[in-house]
Amino acid sequence: MSLRQRLLSQSTVIFGARVFGAGVIFLAQAAIARFWGAEILGEYLLIIATVNIVAVFLPLGFHTVGTYFAAEYRSRGQGGLLRGFMRRTYSHLLVGALVLLVVGYPIAESFGEPGKVLTAHWIPACLMALATGAVYCNTALLVGLRRPFAGYFADTVFRPMLVALCFGISGLALGVAAKLDEMIWLLAIGFVLIAAGQFAWLLRAVRDVPASAAAAPADRKRWWRFAMPWVVISLATDFYFDIDLLVLSNLLDRESLAVFGVCTRVFSLVAFGVSAVYAVTLPEMFERSAASDREGFMRQIGEANLVASGISVGLFAVVAAIAPLLLMLFGPEFEVGVAPLAVLCLTLCVRSVFGPAAMVLSIHDRPYATLPAVVLGMTVLVTANILLVPAHGLMGAAIAALIAQTIWSAAMWVTARRFAGIDVSIGPRLRELLARRVPKDV
């Protein structure tokens, strides 16, 4: 099987699992609202959202570079460094969870009504945050060790199935408050079991990497040097539209803000299909880089960009076709989001065309070089929103996001050309393919 076919097949399976999991979660949440009431659903979503956000910070950013270092150490056979990185990552996670359990309670109480909801389920919420943080770390490391299915399936398949199962079991309790309390405890236990099972699988994968010298102080400094900028990059990418919604909250009315929020959630699901392509190909990029195989390295980037671009165009067409029906499920007032959602999906094509600049810069030991482009992108986003949204509403917000993503991606591409001397865009690969098709003069 060719590289392009394997990337397409693996990323398609991962994306399909994500869609399946999202559908299960959607149905479970709809069932909670229907049988237990909207207020209970609100409390449940508040707890889950808080757990997810807290879990991002517990490893102190090491999960954001776990794939990077796991792929590097695996390709070089440096098992000692890999184990040292893992010990540091999970020590951060455990210490952070302990601090959260002891110190977080009085802090949470000061947040008013949301704090009351969270403190009412404090111990299971802390367990869920610990387990979720562990899944983040496990997933990053497993993807770097070329185990993408074991990495992604814990979060995209098993956790959604657990939510549905826990809802069914909790329905036997008397009273909606008791049902929610039982469901949160069952989820906490289930999350821990899933994280433990995934961690056991990770340990099996780590044994395949030959042991070598233990981590030195220079290695630990390098971990921090990569983790700190990637925390910023991760926040600006994974939480890009959360930041956008905060900006738009002062520019749009509540109904329009809700419509745009639904559009961004659909976009985030679709964007995962493109991100999976680059996650799958990262370990092989490291192998080429470690072997000083520049031609093979460029081929890896080119193939990944081709597959990602093809998926982007396909997903854009699918979303454009089903968006009216999809948004209609939320109510007739959401139909105005069809065109803005299509515009948002164009940003996937932009990302794929310009290529994985941040990833390549990190491979070439230039992680901080990406920060100016990140700052530029966020500045353009805020400015474009202020200029476009008052006059054009939802479409203005979508166009602002597209402009910001285009300038951000272009700036990252220029940065990679400057510091790494590599054109990470789809251009080189397209020129190579076109050159093969054009007959040479005899």
Image (cartoon, grey):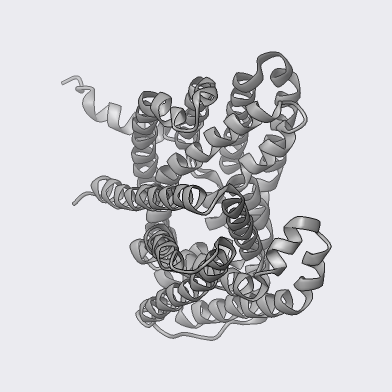
Question: Can residue 139 be seen at all in this image of the molecule?
Answer: yes
Q: Quadrant of the C terminus?
A: top left
Q: Nearer the viewer, residue 419 or 117?
A: 117
Q: Nearer the viewer, residue 299 or 335?
A: 335
Taking the spot 26% from the left edge, 51% from the top edge, the residue there is 6
Q: Where does residue 301 sit, x and y in percent of width and height?
A: 40, 45
**Farthest residue, direction left:** 442
211 over 8 or under it: above or below: below
**Farthest residue, direction right:** 110
Q: Where does residue 168 sit, x and y in percent of width and height?
A: 40, 63
Question: Can residue 294 be seen at all in this image of the molecule?
Answer: no
Looking at the rendering, which quadrant does residue 438 occupy? top left
7 over 147 or under it: above or below: above
Q: Where does residue 291 sit, x and y in percent of width and height?
A: 39, 62
Looking at the rendering, which quadrant does residue 304 occupy? top left
Q: How many labels sit on residues?
A: 0
Horizontal side, residue 403 vs residue 384: left or right? left
Horizontal side, residue 407 vs residue 206: left or right? right
Q: Where does residue 167 sit, x and y in percent of width and height?
A: 44, 62
Taking the spot 61% from the left edge, 29% from the top edge, the residue there is 401
85 over 274 or under it: above or below: below
Horizontal side, residue 192 vs residue 258: left or right? left
**Farthest residue, direction front:** 174
Horizontal side, residue 154 vs residue 383: left or right? left
